Image: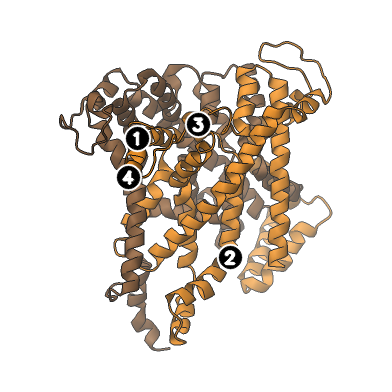
């Protein structure tokens, strides 16, 4: 008991010294001790104890499905339970020769490419406008951001109604200014753009907020100095705002690409992948082969091909951003 | 500088409204900015307005070939009454509310605990654990739906709320966000407690958590919104009408009502209402929450 008290006293004494110089040696001591001191054991127990609840969920609902899905992709498993045996890479071979899979992957990539540009640019414009200093800030933030709070089903109901070829508001407005009516969700050449417009309306508010927060962090002195030098609003935007926003832009593009690759909800609800598969994304194809076609093993194989695509894109982005910052 | 204390009140009032620059002259440039911002705002509000107008029409007016903002036979709340009478909207709202709340609470609890360990405790294998959690951020949830479904069948959880809740509580990015915040809390604040022999759990609950309210709120808001709006997983894991969440329930209503446009819009608006109301009350926190977690997420 007394020896414990003295060691505590020693520690207390150490802590009464100015904290900065004391901290690093004490930490070195904790991590550097090779022998399993009681402190070390306690840290190990505490560390894994605190991690345990998360780890349990992580292993059961993320790691296990991830590994089990990989195993399933190597079997002929179906929802009806037939053929659980391993069939090697047959599912992957079949998928790579499956025109429908390639078509859905192509749709996913196409959507990602054409949606990312407006989702970043419009967000930037919105943030720049609000950042100039408009009155009633809450009103603009509310208008631009509110759609992000809606469920995909609500967005799909709104837009299906507005896209309605005969009764819809959009075609009616087009007719009023003398433009031809468009079969928004029924024309294979237009349907994906209709999805992009709805998605832009729905989710641009998230990027808008990220941009606005970043703009508010740019020190005002930069602008003051620039206006003393006689730089106008445009000059200031391109010479100060945009360069300062580069890390934010990189991050938004990164998040946006990864989010767009996962598209499913609004497509499934507005067009169910049609007309003639022109909007069907790969996630919908995974869902259909698994739950409508009952081919779980095959579906899992496509999931892993999709996962491979995501990893490839992420790795690419990682190297691009690293080269930029280097 | 002596003027620093003098300017401080002014600086604070600026930060309260952040970017509002009052008493600025209305130049041509500012007028143009206002005009463009207003056009965008109108475009962004039109779907809400049009849905609202439609919801207050009679079905006949809604399906009339001529588009009208003011219906010929006047406004009526019939659609809302019908949706409430035969609808499950209140039930689905409740289901969404408690599954999202459960997801948020469990996510916060388990993420904060592991984030604290990663931030403060030197334990064997910490680096490996950190790497694995960060790496898992890249896993797209749709990849897991097939094996997760199978797993839920094996656990006899399909068609229970557990199937909706449990797989949604793992947010590796949020663990990272929390860890980064905990890292910034000065260690000095804990030292007295350590000297007094306080347990880790005590330090965590009585020192770290109270200091982390802003980030806990931010994470909670982010997790709640994403759980509230999640469609794919609840759609796959539930068929029983009594446990459907709002987004999934609405999907069934769409086909049930067929071309009942007014009722469709009424149910969409009722479904949108709770989060919009929450937003109006907690605007500042929600915006901060999305901005912080989004920014810190990478």
- Residue B231: numbered disc: 3
Location of the C terminus of chain A (image quadrant): bottom right
Please say if the residues under marks 1 and 2 sit with CB atoms less than 8 Å apart.
no
Real-space CA distance between mark 1 and mark 2, rounded to the nearest whole angstrom: 40 Å
Q: Is residue B48 above or below residue B161?
A: below
The chain letter corresponding to orange is A
Q: Is residue A74 above or below residue A210?
A: above
Front label number (3 vs 4):
4
Query: How far from the left and from the top, in percent, is residue A138?
Result: 32, 57
Quadrant hosting residue A68: top right
Q: Secondary structure at mark 3?
A: loop
Q: Residue at left 54%, top 39%?
A: B107
Determine which residue is flagged by label 2. A246
* Mark found first going from the N terminus, 1 or 2: 1
Query: How far from the left and from the top, in percent, is residue A318?
Result: 70, 55
Real-space CA distance between mark 3 and mark 4, rounded to the nearest whole angstrom: 24 Å
Determine which residue is flagged by label 4. B46
The chain letter corresponding to brown is B
Please say if the residues under marks 1 and 3 sit with CB atoms less than 8 Å apart.
no
Tell me the chain of label 3: B
Determine which residue is flagged by label 1. A168
Real-space CA distance between mark 4 and mark 2, rounded to the nearest whole angstrom: 32 Å
């Amino acid at each position: 008991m007394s020896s414990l008290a003295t060691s505590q006293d020693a520690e207390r004494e150490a802590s009464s010294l100015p904290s900065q110089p004391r901290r690093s040696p004490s930490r070195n001591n904790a991590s550097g001790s090779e022998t399993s001191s009681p402190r070390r054991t306690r840290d190990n127990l505490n560390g894994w104890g605190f991690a345990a609840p998360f780890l349990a969920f992580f292993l059961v609902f993320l790691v296990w499905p991830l590994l089990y899905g990989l195993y399933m992709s190597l079997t002929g498993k179906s929802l009806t339970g037939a053929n659980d045996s391993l069939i090697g890479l047959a599912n992957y071979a079949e998928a790579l020769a499956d025109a429908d899979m390639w078509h859905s992957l192509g749709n996913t990539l196409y959507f990602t490419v054409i949606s990312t540009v407006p989702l970043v640019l419009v967000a930037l414009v919105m943030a720049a406008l609000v950042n100039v200093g408009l009155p009633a800030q809450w009103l603009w933030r509310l208008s631009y951001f509110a759609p992000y709070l809606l469920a995909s089903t609500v967005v799909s109901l709104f837009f299906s109604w507005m896209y309605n070829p005969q009764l819809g508001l959009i075609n009616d407005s087009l007719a009023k200014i003398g433009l031809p009516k468009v079969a928004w969700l029924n024309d294979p050449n237009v349907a994906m753009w209709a999805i992009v417009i709805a998605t832009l309306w729905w989710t641009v508010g998230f990027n808008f907020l990220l941009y606005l927060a970043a703009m508010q962090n740019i020190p005002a002195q930069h602008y003051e100095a620039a206006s003393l030098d006689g730089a106008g609003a445009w000059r200031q935007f391109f010479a100060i705002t945009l360069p300062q926003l580069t890390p934010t832009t990189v991050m938004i593009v990164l998040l946006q690409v990864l989010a767009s690759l996962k598209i499913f909800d609004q497509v499934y609800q507005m067009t169910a992948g049609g007309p003639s598969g022109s909007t069907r994304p790969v996630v919908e194809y995974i869902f259909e082969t698994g739950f409508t076609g009952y081919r779980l093993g095959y579906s899992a194989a496509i999931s892993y091909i999709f996962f491979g695509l995501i990893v490839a894109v992420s790795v690419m982005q990682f190297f691009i951003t690293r080269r930029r910052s280097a | 500088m002596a003027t620093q204390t003098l300017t401080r009140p002014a600086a604070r009032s600026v930060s309260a409204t952040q970017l509002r620059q009052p008493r600025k002259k209305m130049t041509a440039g500012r007028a143009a900015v206002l005009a463009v911002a207003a056009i965008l705002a109108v475009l962004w509000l039109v779907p809400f307005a049009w849905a609202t107008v439609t919801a207050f029409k009679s079905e006949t007016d809604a399906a009339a070939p001529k588009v009208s903002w003011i219906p010929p036979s006047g406004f009526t709340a019939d659609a809302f009454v019908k949706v409430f009478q035969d609808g499950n909207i209140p039930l689905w709202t409740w289901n969404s509310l408690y599954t999202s709340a459960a997801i948020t609470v469990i996510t916060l609890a388990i993420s904060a605990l592991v984030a604290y360990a990663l931030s403060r405790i030197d334990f064997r294998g910490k680096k490996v654990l950190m790497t694995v959690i960060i790496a898992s951020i890249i896993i797209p949830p749709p990849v897991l739906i097939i094996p997760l479904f199978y797993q839920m069948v094996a656990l006899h959880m399909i068609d229970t709320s557990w199937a909706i809740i449990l797989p949604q509580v793992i947010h590796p990015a949020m663990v990272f966000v929390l860890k980064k915040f905990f890292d910034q809390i000065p260690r000095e604040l804990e030292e007295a407690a350590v000297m007094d022999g306080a347990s880790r759990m005590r330090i965590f609950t009585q020192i770290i958590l109270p200091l982390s309210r802003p980030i806990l709120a931010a994470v909670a808001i982010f997790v709640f919104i994403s759980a509230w709006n999640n469609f794919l997983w609840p759609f796959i894991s539930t068929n029983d009408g009594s446990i459907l969440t709002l987004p999934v329930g609405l999907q069934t209503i769409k086909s049930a009502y067929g071309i009942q446009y007014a009722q469709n819009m009424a149910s969409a608006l009722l479904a949108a209402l709770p989060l919009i109301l929450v937003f109006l009350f907690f605007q500042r926190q929600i915006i901060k929450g999305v901005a912080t977690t989004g920014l810190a997420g990478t």
